[in-house]
Amino acid sequence: MSDAREMLVEDICMYLGMKNINIQDIKNELYIVVNNYAVEKETTEIVEYEGDVNEILIKRFLASKTIQGCTQRTIRFYAAELKRFNAFVNKPFTQVTADDIRYLTAKKLTIDKVSKTTVGNTQRCLSSFFTWMEKEEITEKNIMLKVEKMKKEKKKKKAFTETDIEKIRDGCKTERDKCLVEVLLSTWCRVSEVINMKISDIKPDGSMTVLGKGEKERTVYLNAKAQYQIDKYLSQRNDKEDWLFVALDEPHEQLKKSAIEIRVRQIGRRQGVENCHPHRFRRTGATFALRAGMPIEDVSRILGHEQLSTTQIYLDIDDEKTHASHKKYAM
């Protein structure tokens, strides 16, 4: 055994001996240690690395994703992740190995203390990138197929209670806030969809078309409460903007996503409602509709989900209600 290997074994033993870890963590800890050792297959091939090559590949990948119809938010996410990954590996993407990815994963979890959800997002980005590289015949194999997938933390996300909703309604101080809350509850829209709603899009029957993920159109619906609050809100506006939600002060510009998120959080904090954010209204409205008897296919269509399985995971349906339904409908 070479001196380097003896040192490697001793380092691993010493490193693990100082830590109180379980079996599942050992692999991550090992990758932290062995990263300090260069283990290479001897080769006579001369490789010249030009940093720009990786940047060109990133640009080509982003262009491909744009053509596929990915949203600008998704494109920005891919760009940021790949920029960080490029700085981390500091070598041509064609020379990146599965061990590089494993070390990155281990480092994020054990040293950077990043959540499993965040690491999983990084892995999904890299998986998409290296799948594209294989498809474009830039690499022969997709190295991500060798990397163990990060299991998502399964935390059941809760809808608002009826009491929460009434507290939030009481906390609305302006007609715009009241309108916003009812629109979120009625349409189940993402906040990115809400900011792009236009007054001219609202049909007489209370339906309207929104542009969702992947630039896909779908129809959503305004109930009586939402329509009533929209009428009250619009009656006290004195601007000529077609955007449904605009700034209160001149020049009454289209409300930004961050402005809605901040406003909703402020209302929640003031009323003592935890985890008050726009997306939770989406889950709440859909959950209440399903509990009231709306077919899950209709719920899924309004939410803009392509698969029913997504809707089933998404909604907050407790075991007690499932048990009651089983008693009612099962033979």
Image (cartoon, rainbow, N blue to C red):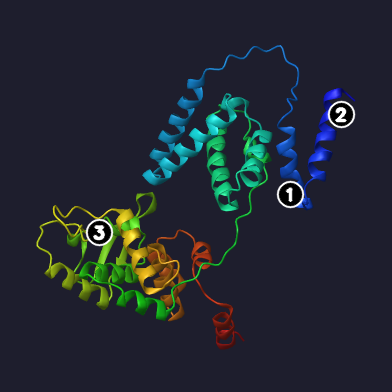
Which quadrant of the figure contains the N terminus? top right
Query: What amino acid is found at the position of numbered circle 2 in the picture?
Result: Glu
Q: Which residue is mark 3?
A: 197
Please name which of the two marks, 1 or 3, marks the residue nearer to the observer: 1
Question: Callout 2: helix, strand or loop?
Answer: helix
Q: Which residue is mark 1?
A: 25
From this view, report whether residue 126 is shown above or below residue 2.
below
Residue 88 position, x and y percent, is 57, 32
From this view, report whether residue 47 is shown above or below residue 17.
above
The local crowd at label 2, few if under 14, some if 14 to 19, many if 20 or more residues have their Cα within 10 Å, is few
- Which residue is at 30% across, 59% downward? 194
Q: Is residue 41 left or right of residue 131?
A: right
Residue 36 position, x and y percent, is 72, 30
Tell me the number on the disc at residue 6: 2
* Mark 1 and mark 3: Cα distance apart in space: 48 Å
- Which residue is at 36% across, 77% downward? 167
Residue 54 position, x and y percent, is 51, 25
Please name which of the two marks, 2 or 3, marks the residue nearer to the observer: 2
Q: Is residue 91 left or right of residue 45?
A: left
- Regarding residue 211, the answer to whether it shows in the image is no
- Of all residues, the one furthest to the front in this rendering is 18
Q: Is residue 291 left or right of residue 177?
A: right
From this view, report whether residue 265 is shown above or below residue 330.
above
CB of mark 2 within 8 Å of CB of mark 3? Answer: no
Question: Callout 3: helix, strand or loop?
Answer: loop
Query: What amino acid is found at the position of numbered circle 1 in the picture?
Result: Asp
The local crowd at label 3, few if under 14, some if 14 to 19, many if 20 or more residues have their Cα within 10 Å, is some
Residue sitting nearer the eye, 140 or 16: 16
* Mark 2 and mark 1: Cα distance apart in space: 23 Å
Which of the marked residues, 2 or 3, is nearer the chain's N terminus?
2
